[in-house]
Amino acid sequence: MRLTGRIIKGIGGFYYVYVVEDGLYECRAKGIFRNKKMKPHVGDYVEIDIISFEEKTGNLAVIKPRMNQLIRPMVSNVDQAMVIFAVRDPQPDFHLLNRFLITMKKQDIPVVICFNKMDLADPEEEERLRSDFGGSGCQLRFLSALNQEGIQTVEELLLGKTTVLAGPSGVGKSSTLNCLSLDKQMETGDISEKIRRGKHTTRHSELIYLGRDTYLMDTPGFSSLYLEDMEKEDLRYYFPEFEPYENTCRYNGCSHTHEPDCKVKEALEEGKISRLRYDDYVMFYEELSQKKKW
């Protein structure tokens, strides 16, 4: 018998396929995928041939066409990314946040930025954050998981979508998720035990089914994001706030760093572009300029 499900984790040659209303199946990939050089990804919708209903085992038979495919993390069929930062304790690393925004923009993944621990913030903090990231092309959400404020707006954004969740440690990701009233069907019981048992204990990307066509993926390795496979000349295209000024500078292909009569720099001085975002742009531009050409 053949069932349709979704790969929620892959490790050690096993792929764990969640079939709604039927549970989790431990599957192997057939040799046909290796022959076609097709590697199953977390997030893939698949068809599986059942070996045992009792043991919940099967073989991957078909990988359905992908809507999209991220490289880092390696996951497919993603609707959006949500990144959580604390406004205090720990202090936000905006360099890291801007790296993440560039990485997602490069892969055409919409981003929601959640600023947590607003209960610790100064009254003016939300206004400053809106000023810095309002032009980034991202949706902004301000919340306090401790006081359960703003959680409903996060739920509304998650519902019915597959969301890559990211953020450094200590920002309140777990407490935020614990506030959600979605089903959280994958968090406890036999499913979690089956994935983590024995040798399958390495930290890997994993989709969590929250019910109602809603999936979350927590991404490991968030603290080490590098700008790769990118030329410095292309960096400006990943800063949406620069877009209104493209092709208006004196020089074609203006890098918006040192050239005279640069409209982006003029907008910066007029307060139309965030100084924080622009300074990171210049830093990243220099970083890419120093990249060795192999």
Image (cartoon, helix red, strand yellow):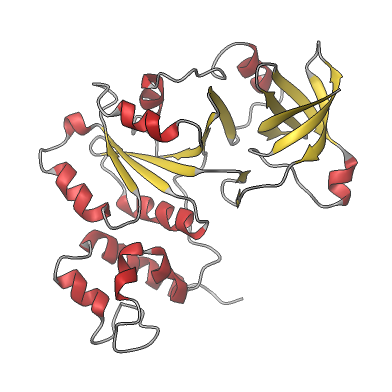
Q: Residue furthest left?
A: 123
15 vs 219, left or right, is: right
| Image position, residue 224 (x, y; %) | 47, 49
Q: Quadrant of residue 262?
A: bottom left
**Quarter occupied by the N terminus:** top right
179 to 292, vertically: above or below: above
254 vs 117, left or right, is: right
| Image position, residue 141 (x, y; %) | 29, 39
The answer to whether residue 31 is seen in the rendering is yes
Q: Quadrant of residue 101?
A: bottom left
**Quarter occupied by the C terminus:** bottom right
| Image position, residue 235 (x, y; %) | 43, 69
In the image, 203 versus 41, the foreground residue is 41
142 to 110, vertically: above or below: above
Q: How many marks?
A: 0
- Residue at image location 54% in from the left, 31% down from the top: 215
The answer to whether residue 282 is seen in the rendering is no
75 vs 235, left or right, is: right
Q: Quadrant of residue 150?
A: top left
| Image position, residue 106 (x, y; %) | 49, 60
283 vs 17, left or right, is: left
- Residue at image location 68% in from the left, 33% down from the top: 7
